[in-house]
Image (tube, rainbow, N blue to C red):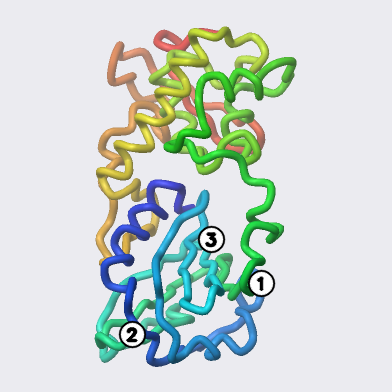
Amino acid sequence: MPELPEVETTRRGIEPHAAGRAIREVIVRRHDLRQPVTPGLDDIAGRRITGVRRRSKYLLIDIDDGRVLLVHLGMSGSLRVTDAAAAWRKHDHVALTLDSGAQLRYHDPRRFGLVLLLPHGAETNHPLLARLGPEPLGDGFSAATLAAACRNRSATIKQVIMDGGVVVGVGNIYASEALFRAGIRPRTRASRVGPRRLARLAEAIRAVLGEAIGQGGTTLRDFVNSDGNPGYFRQRLFVYDRGGEPCRVCATPVRRAVVGQRSTFWCPACQKP
């Protein structure tokens, strides 16, 4: 699933092509995504895109009348900039043709994503967005907020940092990598992690996400960014998806277990309970 760095990479790739452009045409080839594409989406034809934002793993395309087009990439989706004359691929479902001749095309083989048009003023109260925690790269996330979330929590530290109400966008890959950098085992009870280690973890979360964005995300199966190219952060993963392989730091075999129904990886030597 595309995680925060992949979505932010997509946003950065799309915004220069979309911001300030008028929408010349809206094409919907399939409506049956995870939720149906908003009926009457072509009502935004003739309107202008004023910006492209990201909230957690959601892309928010601002329309000049105050409405917002919410796009979620689901398990296998991508939003690419292409020429409007380019041939459509099998799983291209929705497109916005811009007055520049470029087209924003939503591609989603599994159809687990979303393309929803939110009314003016409905964004902050929408069920998908209303209960989200702070952005990990913003001022609202810190060692103090992480410590408050961990206090008296019996859940594992990995489950806590993947809780979107605590901090958004820390998916399975980056949770494993941040915990490795902080030297904390993923199955450690959150309430047992002391202030200094939580401070290291908060900094590790920011660092690993920032580096992944700089590398264009992580390609594990079929993620590609807005221009159709893969991300390269996978080459820098220390533990994720490396079960049984030697740790890149100490050569101890990386271990794998299931935590919260997700595969989890750690080094038993570099990470402590």
Query: Where's residue 138, x and y in %?
Result: 45, 37
State the residue in front, 100 or 155. 100
Q: Nearer the viewer, mark 2 or mark 1?
A: 2
Give the residue at mark 1: 35
Residue type at mark 3? Answer: Gly
Distance from Cα at disc 2 to Cα at disc 1? 25 Å
Residue 43 at x, y percent in the picture? 55, 90
- What residue do we see at 63% from left, 28% from top? 160
Residue marked by disc 2: 98
Q: Quadrant of the C terminus?
A: top right
- How packed mark 1 is, by other alpha carbons closer than 10 Å (few <14, some 14-19, many 20 or more), is few
Observer-side mark, 3 or 2, equals 2
Per the image, label 2 sits on a secondary structure element best described as strand
**Residue drawn at the location 55% of the way across and 9% of the way down:** 195
Q: Residues within 10 Å of mark 3 (few under 14, many from 20)?
A: many
- Disc 3 from disc 2: Cα separation: 24 Å
Q: Is residue 199 above or below residue 123?
A: above
Q: Residue at x 40, y 64 (%)?
A: 52
Q: Earlier in the sequence, mark 2 or mark 1?
A: 1
First in residue order: circle 3 vs circle 2:
3
